[in-house]
Amino acid sequence: MYKELIINTTEHETRVSLLEDGTIVELFIDRGDDSNIAGNIYKGRVQRVLPGMQAAFVDIGLQQAAFIYVDDVLGDVYGEIEDFFLKSANEVDDDGSENENVMLTTDYEKPIVPIEELISEGQEILVQVAKSPIGSKGARITSHISLPGRFLVLMPTVNHIGISRRIEDEDERTRLKDVICDLREKDYGYIVRTAGEGVGRDRFEKEMHFLINLWNKVQKKHQAASAPALLHKELTITLRAVRDLLTDEADKLIVDSSEAYQSVQSFLQEFMPGLKDSVELYKGKEPLFDAYNLEVDISRALKKKVWLKSGGYIVIEQTEALIAIDVNTGRYVGKHNFEETILKTNLEAVKEIAYQIRLRNLGGIIIIDFIDMEKLVDREKVFSALKDALKKDKSKTNVLPMSEMGLIQMTRKRVRKSLSRILCEPCFYCDGDGYLISKQSICYNIFREILREAQDMAGNRFTLRVNPEIADYLHGEENHLVSSLEKILNKQIVIYPNSRFHVEEFDVFEIIKN
């Protein structure tokens, strides 16, 4: 599979897309705001400790306070736990995207120590952003610092060495662990990333010194700065793409900015000189994303309904806490029997669902409603196909078997905003509801409101101001409502259209003639 990184850079926005055989599979966007700050290190001040939730809010200088759970608080009580972070070196993840690869997922038992015994309000603490702010939630932070390099991740708060699970050869795993154990001078923890496979001792030694010097600089800034303060900022999205995706995930990088091209070349010269020929400066007249037909795919990834080649389709609904995906046969009627039609539609939907989840960066709880299948063997085929399709996804997923009702429940690690959260905002007209009250319902609401207000009105005539579309509806299909009101109240009703009114908005007032 041929993979390319396509980077479009302007003064205010950078977009990085990962292509697999010419198809966009991942998209990262940076607009220079606080939407993507994962990996940044801050000196924060504890604002409030919540014993009931075993968490705390910390001011790190952003609009929203960050939050930290007791599991992520570094305290002396944990110093005696040798195997604090990782169950074993064989269970280290290195998924290579947007710094997710260096934020460790812990699944271990810890001593029960209340958070109020570890930190207190007003205390200054050194923290790193594990998850950028998402929606109404502030950034999630941790006291356990991780500094990623090209081949290694330095974990100065942990005395442990781990190897990326993507490195499968046992002899190579043993060699890498021996090299790192021999090289390290302090009881710092390290993870060997996937890109470290086959790398020689001297390159590990050079990067180890670089990361230790970086950590020392962070500590010095921490001692001198007043909270809240930014101590270390992650690389730009362009350089992160070079560090994490080039060669490991992509064979070529194409960028359309001379400045970004020079920045990439300088970075490669210092850290990966052998990859300089893999970078190309795009000089075409047509915009880079247009040349690769990416804008169409991005627009398609913002739609609720996605059509399948067979004529079926899937519908993706996103809420604050979960994603619902519905599969439908649509226009597809099949060629043989009904069960075969359903199975083929579900299997085709599996590939599109896995693709859309990755491209849209959907995370959290995901419920997939496949078309009901009576045969257990068919349900198992769809379940296995989904698990296989998700193997390309670098974000951690957990998929439960399909229920008898055709539902699959799964979770996907969420570290940054989904594509729709970055590129879209709630509709100003429907206020994010995704629907409007029907014109007929609005007319009946008006009917009831006039009857309600007529009891306290002594005017000779009612004036009704509405949206022009509702005015047309009241003069046309629902004219019988107006006639009925005039007969009941024995008063004239005059309708005035107002283009500035929302379709659901209306005003009723009385006219009194002497």
Image (cartoon, rainbow, N blue to C red):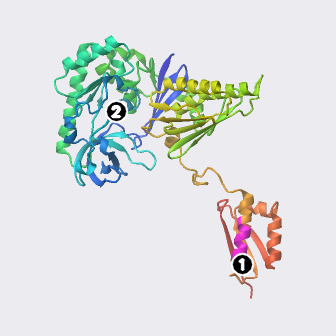
Image point (80%, 62%), residue name = 478
For mark 2, what is the residue? 104
Callout 2 secondary element: loop
**Crowding at mark 1 (Cα within 10 Å: few <14, some 14-19, many 20+):** some
What's the distance in space between the residues labelled 2 and 1, CA to CA?
Answer: 66 Å
Q: Secondary structure at mark 1?
A: helix
Question: How many callouts does the rendering have?
Answer: 2
Q: Which residue is mark 1?
A: 454
Q: 18 or 259: nearer the eye? A: 18
Observer-nearest residue: 317 or 200? Answer: 317
- Disc nearest the viewer among 2 and 1: 2
Residue 174 in view:
yes
Return the residue nearer the eye: 315 or 237.
315
Tell me the quarter of the picture where residue 201 sits: top left
Q: Position of residue 29 (x, y in %)?
A: 46, 36
Q: Is residue 133 above or below residue 6?
A: below
- Percent coordinates x, y for residue 200 in the rendering: 27, 12
Magenta stretch, residue numbers? 445-452
Q: Residue 331 placed where, x, y %?
A: 75, 32
| Amino acid type, mark 1 | Ala
Position of residue 494 measured from the top left corner of the image (x, y, whole percent): 77, 72
Q: Main structural element of the magenta stretch: helix, strand or loop?
A: helix
Q: Is residue 108 above or below residue 23?
A: below
Q: Residue at x 26, y 30 (%)?
A: 83
Q: In the rendered structure, which disc, 2 or 1, sits on the residue that comes first in sequence? A: 2
Residue 163 in view, yes or no = no
**Side (left or right) of 230 relative to 37:** left
Identify the amino acid type marked 2: Leu
Q: Image height check: is 432 above or below 296?
A: below
Compared across the picture, whether 62 is left or right of 210 comes to right
